[in-house]
Amino acid sequence: MFESKWRSKVQERYDEHRGRANPCTRQKGEPWVQERQVRELEPVPGIEDVDATVVRLDDHIRFVHVISRSFDQMNSHGGAFACMPNIDRNQVHYVFEGQARQAPLQAFVDVWFLAVFMPKVAPWLRETWPRWGRFAGEVSQVTSSYAFGGGMREGQFRLLKRSDIYRKSSEAIKGHLSKGTRATRNDLRLRIAQTNVCSE
């Protein structure tokens, strides 16, 4: 029974109901019809394939936001490459070296920092961002040596992970990963899973 203040709305709802593929009362032996819309999901790039040239930092950014802002710009403008479909579970889904992977947030941030920020974003910012020298100096004070010259050693990375810069960056990256609706994040998770299937 459809009720509404306007008769036209009642008739419209009734017509929609009668036009369904599966009526309320089916004849015995009449099949149940399920309509599915198959769509092609485009694959997600691996984190090592993302483009660092989309990162643009202004002169007024606080140093604790450099790492997380770089991540956000790469994940939103360069095409999403990581997602956290369920915020409560703290699991990040991403593609790395052609394989779909899941990791806790902190492990993902470590992988992204070592595989993307150090080899790609740091050289790009060194060339394009006027405050790079001051930022690198700030990080050097935390790590007790110049961390952005060449490869970062394990001891330097451990010191950096304990710093306020790195902790605040991890929290901000969690916020960036939780942007958008849950449906959008789940769609990205499905695309990441399909990327793994396509690469086999």
Image (cartoon, rainbow, N blue to C red):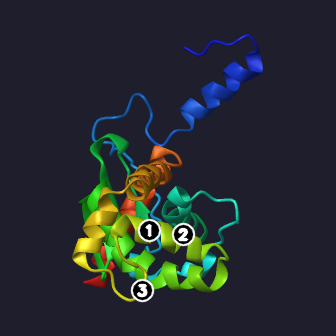
Task: Label 1: state its secondary structure.
Answer: helix
Query: How crowded is the residue under tag 2: few (<14 C-alpha within 10 Å), some, or many (20+)?
Result: some
> Whole-Å distance between the Cαs marked 2 and 3?
13 Å
Residue type for callout 1: Val
Q: Disc 3 designates what residue?
A: 149
Task: Determine the residue located farthest toward the bottom in the rendered image.
Answer: 150
> Separation of disc 1 and disc 2 at Cα?
6 Å
Q: Report the front residue among 92 and 19.
A: 92
Is residue 66 visible in the rendered image? The answer is: yes
For this view, does 77 lie left or right of residue 116? right
Name the residue: 67% across, 77% down.
130
Contact (Cβ within 8 Å) of mark 3 with mark 1 = no
Question: Can you tell which mark lies on residue 161?
Answer: none
Quadrant in the picture for residue 98: bottom left
Q: Which residue is mark 1?
A: 139
* Occupied quadrant, residue 29: top left
What is the distance, in whole Å, between disc 3 and disc 1 at their CAs? 11 Å
* Quarter of the image with the C terminus in it: bottom left
State yes or no: discs 1 and 2 in contact (Cβ < 8 Å).
yes
Judging by the rendered image, the residue that carries numbered circle 2 is 135
